[in-house]
Amino acid sequence: MLKKVLVVEDLDSIGFGIAQMLKQQARIENVTQSLYCDDAYLKFLRSEKDNDLFDLLITDLSFKEDHRESKIKSGAELIQLLKERQPELKTIVYSVEDRSIKIKQLFEDKKIDGYVVKGRHGLRNLVEGISEIEKGNTYVSPELSGFMSQREVFEIEDYDLILLSHLSSGLTQEQIAVNFKQKGISPSSVSSIEKRLNRLKLEFKAKNAIHLVASAKDLGLI
Amino acid sequence: MLKKVLVVEDLDSIGFGIAQMLKQQARIENVTQSLYCDDAYLKFLRSEKDNDLFDLLITDLSFKEDHRESKIKSGAELIQLLKERQPELKTIVYSVEDRSIKIKQLFEDKKIDGYVVKGRHGLRNLVEGISEIEKGNTYVSPELSGFMSQREVFEIEDYDLILLSHLSSGLTQEQIAVNFKQKGISPSSVSSIEKRLNRLKLEFKAKNAIHLVASAKDLGLI
DNA sequence: CATTTCCTTACGGGATCCCGTAATTGACCT
DNA sequence: AGGTCAATTACGGGATCCCGTAAGGAAATG
């Protein structure tokens, strides 16, 4: 039975909605909210000290930067840190991210127990997920459960995103190649970069690089 | 006094959070939620029919597409439609969009009454905004109020916007020149187009055309 | 009318992109 | 070793962009 829950989410409207829903629908009274990952970490440390550990972590992945300087920048990092200290902590990620590659990585690398996509029925799915996890199962939102099993159709990898964002900040393909070599990102030759851009242009039906970057921006990829 | 409120937001966690907050903090009992703009429009028509109009509309700007086909794609369109039928309807936009140009346009073109940025204190600001609007004032989130007053430095003409948007949709300078000649837009030679692009690149400190278009998109110009 | 000034257009050369082909590498299997 | 396959890299030619210079034309000025 999950009794004590930590909710980490920068948009207060969402955090508040989750907390209210947990109390009303999942009969969970003990809900702690954090707007920052760093703050969540402190609250976690406090729970260790008080010997009153959390049963469940619900966290977003990305957090807006603001005036406060933050050490922990993403939900993934937070999960990493907390699981190092309390490996059996149940974890649900609640995010708009819906690329199955990303989500698979979280299950594999971070050993999360559930993934719920923020969407029209995110809250309902979240409640479902909690009850599955109480039974000892894992959970993914229904809109994804189909994709999770099938191997990648066409997925945009981090490599593509880095490439696109370098392009969008004005680097030439030559400069990107140099940059990749420095950072040890492979493939790094101009030729391979061109080839990858071609694939992306095909995929997005873009007429040229400008069009490609513009489309990527419209889609919110970069 | 605002008594009857329509909340339009595709993420149920946010919509639910708003509704709960309105009931608890703003003592507004009559809150209607919609996950789709089309659905919101129907509920609005119903309110006309029942002669029980809404006092306040709170809406997001962007909505995820899903299996349901939708006629109204954005919050801006929804506002347009509702205000045509009920011009005095108070309106607050609640979105992650934080580019002041975009927001100014909403105040000018759509005559909205308030703009609240989804953020760490979005809900708190929303409650503040409602109370300001009840007093007959307009409202913008504090993180933006500084930027809203300052005038845009560099004037960008319609010509530039058309040029940039053609570029962003993948036309070559050659094709744009042809297009301009057809439409009777002057200057229309490739040479002049290049020159104008140079000015823009200087202005935006862009290294090349890709960078320029990406920046323009970031600023919300196109 | 002559001159100046500004705007538009024209042209050319070098950089970069675009796209196809071919060579090189490396992993895996027999 | 040899062979196959996929991924990476290399190269070349044509298109497009980039940037400077200069010619042409219209309006403004004296």
Image (cartoon, coloured by chain):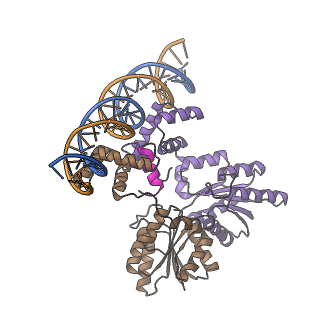
Chain colours: A purple, B brown, C blue, D orange
Q: Picture coordinates of residue D6 (x, y %)?
A: 48, 31
Residue B4 relative to residue A39: left or right:
left
- Toward the bottom, the furthest residue is B51
Q: Residue at x 51, y 66 (%)?
A: B148
Q: Picture coordinates of residue A50 (x, y %)?
A: 84, 60
Q: Which residue is drawn at 51% across and 33% down?
A: A177
Q: Picture coordinates of residue B212 (x, y %)?
A: 43, 48
Q: Which residue is drawn at 41% across and 77% down?
A: B83
Locate residue B72: give its quadrant. Answer: bottom left
Residue A181 showing in the rendered view:
yes
Any magenta on residue B181?
Answer: no
Q: In this view, does A191 lie above or below B55?
A: above
The residue range painted magenta reads B205-222
Q: Nearer the viewer, residue B76 or B199?
A: B199
Q: Which of B200 and A60 is in front in this view?
A: B200
Residue B171 showing in the rendered view:
no
Q: Which residue is drawn at 69% across and 51% down?
A: A72
